[in-house]
Amino acid sequence: MEVSIDDQEAIPMDNSEKSIHHCAEEVGDSNQNEVIASNQQEAEGSHTNRNGIIANQARFISRNPWIHLVVSFIASLAISALGYILAGLPRLDNTGWLSRGTLIADRTTQMHILRNNLENLKQSRNEKYWKTLTETPQDNLLPNARRLVENDSTSKPRNPDRRYLQSWDGCQVYYEPRTVDRNYYLTSMWKVEDGMSALDKAVVKDICRAEENTLYVLNRKNLCQKCGGQCLPPLSIVFYARIHVEDYNFKLSCEDLADRWESKSLNVTSELSKCVDELKEMYSPELIEMPRRCQEAFFFWPTLVDGDFGAGQTSVSYTSSTFLTNGRNTNALYKLVDEYDRAEDSEVVQGAYDTKWNTFADTFAETALNSDTILAAGSALITAIAILVHTRSIWITVIGLFQICLSFPLAYFMYTIAFGLQYFPLLNFIGIYVLFALGADDIFVAMDKWKNGRLDNPNASTEDVAAVTLPDAAGAMLLTTATTAVAFFGTALCQVAALRVFGIFCGLLVVFDYLMCILLVFPALCIYDKWLSRGNNFCCSCHICKKRPRENDVATENNNAASLPHATSEFVNDEARNTATEELIDMEKNSFIRRVMSGFYFYFHKIRWIVFVLSIAAIIVSSIFAARLELPKDSEVRLLNENVEFEKNYNWKQNLLETVLRKSVGSAAMVIFGITPADTGDHNNPLSGSRLVLDETFNPSTQESQTYMLDFCKRFMEQDFASTENGYECPMVAFNEWLGEMTNITDNSTGGSYVYQNYCGSADGLPMPEDDFHLCLSEWANEQGISTVLQRNEIVQVIYFYYRARVRFDRPFNELKNEWNLIEDWMEAERTRAPSGTKNGYQTSIDYWWFDTNDTIQRSAYVSAGIALAFASLVVLISSRSIILVLFSLLTIGYVLTSTTAMLVASGWTLGFLESICFAILIGVSCDFVIHFGHAYAHLPGDVSRHERTQYALVRMGPSILAAAFTTISAALIMVFTVIAFFQQFAKILLFTILQATVGSFFVYTALSDCIGPSNPTYLVYKIFGKCSRCACKIMSKCCKRKADENKAKESGCRSKCCKRKANEEKGDGENMLASD
């Protein structure tokens, strides 16, 4: 059953509305007369007589729609152009993937400023360097943070192999760690097919052929290190085989090599497995000599076999080839990547190239955006088709596309000029897909609201229809715009710059899409209505290719219409207009989608209780499966899809024995005294660095502090979470031992120290006299070349020491978290016992920075998700004014989120930080459809059957929701084919969310409303409001009586009508009023 808008407004106010009306009068509000007049007008009149600021503005727009449309369009173009002129075109950046402003981030920032300037700071005359570091922001390390992890000499264990000498073609060729472990060398990873081993004859032969072809490409472009005019052979399993078949000059063909290797492979494999087992057992970062068995396995490197290889597993599934390329010109190597041989024609092995530093992956990620952006054109095309099909108007489709397209430059203007954000990450371009996916939703709502307004008021003028539809549509769109924008803006709480500015930019896109819909689409709808009402078309409607035939001459009727007096709010009794309007109304009432919605409800209503039970069961089952979502097994963040060659190279490399050994020994970390954790740079710009911030309270010179610092280092190194390399000592321990050694030496010529004799006051150990401490320690560090003690103007400013942590950045999240908490708890206990001058020491490591990034994003995602959910509930309450509908909405949103999560669990996903931030954003998206249904359900005033309300909501909002779902799903499907991993992840979550949101809206929410929905949704809210108003009136009445008793001559306390009337009313009158409510 449909209820016309005219009929809705003609229905008298129910008791709750009367209560509010009556109490508003009693409270004595300053706008009392206006409220009463408005209520009377709405009760007695129709929508066509609607007044108000927005309704009057709608009439104003409808009088001159062309002026508003052209002015808005030109102004938008001007602002967009101004943004690009002042800020330039977006400069894409793939940095900013680390947290800033957190405790761990601040500590690590200061640590790297210190480490990057040690050579200057350890000099005796260094005041200018201290001044520069403490006053001038330093280049930020964020863009190269991953490089710092991989290239950290203290965290990267030395290759345990030793130097080997080979004579080849008259050249002396050295293969040793420092020559074959360059991070810019071209590296090919090889994955052997199941059932085969890299040590098998067929695999060696195919890898050999691929290496020869790749060497030919490198030699032709002069990109390899050469001997005798030929490229040096790569270090690989083929190289290893040649050595063991004594082909030292590399003259054998690949076929001959494979044949000769076959006879030796069994014995070599046996010896090699024993070597690997021994290496695994005794490996440590300070390992210098290879184990004895590995020395027998001549020319072995841990890059030749995988981590599973050993006595229990003698097959090799992963191996690598390291090409000795010359220089650091990785861009030249990247340009030839398509020419490298990956053994495509092999049936036993496949290859994937990159450098040891994975620079190809970074370059590819930056260039992949071009192809991903081109896919956005496909999203725009599908959106245009969807708008055209839904609106059946080329005119509205064109204006709608302008609305969507102009939102991007306008948001960019606000982003760069108003907000002052210079950093524009690669992630922001996902906003293009978001814009086309969600932007069409406003167009569908605006069009449907206009059609409904015209259907309900067939004889009204364009002005009167605009006065009805603009406030209604603007309000409905504002609800969903607000929830989606808040969900995006909520990610600004995240302290990772890339995700923070991404949320801000996408939030601005949603806001400007809404504004452009008001400024462009509504004037276009006024023009659309006037054209159709006059019988003209001009591509306005796809159903009308030319003027409709008239019983009388159209020109004559138009002239007659033009001769009528101009009245903006009166009907134009023009036969041509009435005929066109009636045809439009008949077309809309008999539209296919409306018949579908009516038919859907007809059958749905028969099985509503079955669907209701299934919906509750689905919520329970989805919640159980959603709870199985696990945290990721490592803290690594990858930007490319796993099917990309460079991502394969990285993933396969994680299986090499070299990587496994490196991960097993942890990484380097520091304990620092004298520097305050801080980041003084712009946290929204990864290129903005920080200053060095010194701890002004640090004073290690007191005897209590000296004793504490000495004992602290010993206690720290005794803990299970810390270890040191052989021969390393904390500076305070080494200094104390040196003082003891110098005690009995007084003659400089026989081994005495000039520093000790002149600066140390004959101290025999720590603690020493406070007056001698700074100068003695500073000069000792300078004499010994120790950089872990830094002085400024002969005052010890910083003391730090290294230790080896047990975990690396790529370890599981919970493992990193537990290790961090363990060390922090121990350090916090130490701070309570430390003297006042040494209380601010802390431990730090870049490995924990990656953990902190994941932890920060997940925590902020939970907070922003809570904000989005709470705001969505508030929006539903405001729009529906029904607590019961809020509960229905929360249940439906809960179903959407849990079912989406269950689908992700079934797909093998984990709760990484990209997934976490997607969930936070998509809460706002998931509640859009529910808000539309709830708003339509509560739109009918008074006491109306829940079944009529449910059918009304389906017929009125169902088409818009289905159209919006189609465009969003289409955009998501296109995003699935992008290259950037986050784009794909976002697309899949968006796809799953919209699918479940559509199911949740049409089945879960509809079942709830059709089975147990309220017939008068606003009754409870009005009831509560009425009670609150009555309580407020009673309080004011008591206040009036008290003031009247104090001073009967004055009436200042009883000026309001409510107070005057309440002071004389009996208590029973109030009870009667409540009963009537």
Image (cartoon, rainbow, N blue to C red):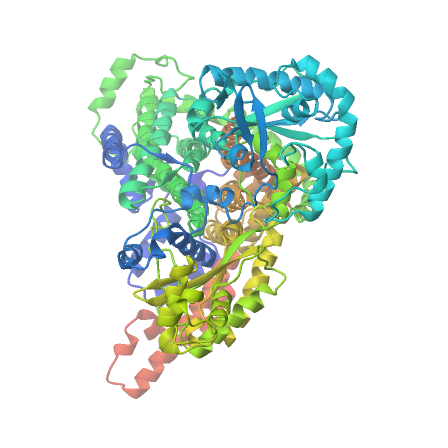
Residue at x 48% of width, y 24% of height: 225
Residue at x 72% of width, y 39% of height: 293
* Residue 756 in the image: above or below residue 38: below
Image x and y of residue 381, in percent: 44, 22
Q: How many marks?
A: 0
Farthest bottom residue in view:
1046
Front residue of 841 and 328: 328
* Residue 391 in the image: above or below residue 806: above
Q: Is residue 559 left or right of residue 242?
A: left
The answer, for residue 650, to whether it is visible in the render is: yes
Front residue of 778 and 63: 778
Q: Is residue 984 left or right of residue 20?
A: right
Front residue of 138 and 665: 665
Farthest front residue in view:
749
The answer, for residue 617, to whether it is visible in the render is: no
Q: Is residue 18 left or right of residue 90?
A: right
The picture quadrant where one finds residue 253 is: top right
Residue at x 39% of width, y 59% of height: 678
Q: Which quadrant of the rendered structure holds the N terminus?
A: top right
Image x and y of residue 140, in percent: 37, 47
Residue at x 68% of width, y 38% of height: 906
Image x and y of residue 996, in percent: 60, 38
Front residue of 128 and 308: 128
Image x and y of residue 495, in percent: 44, 51
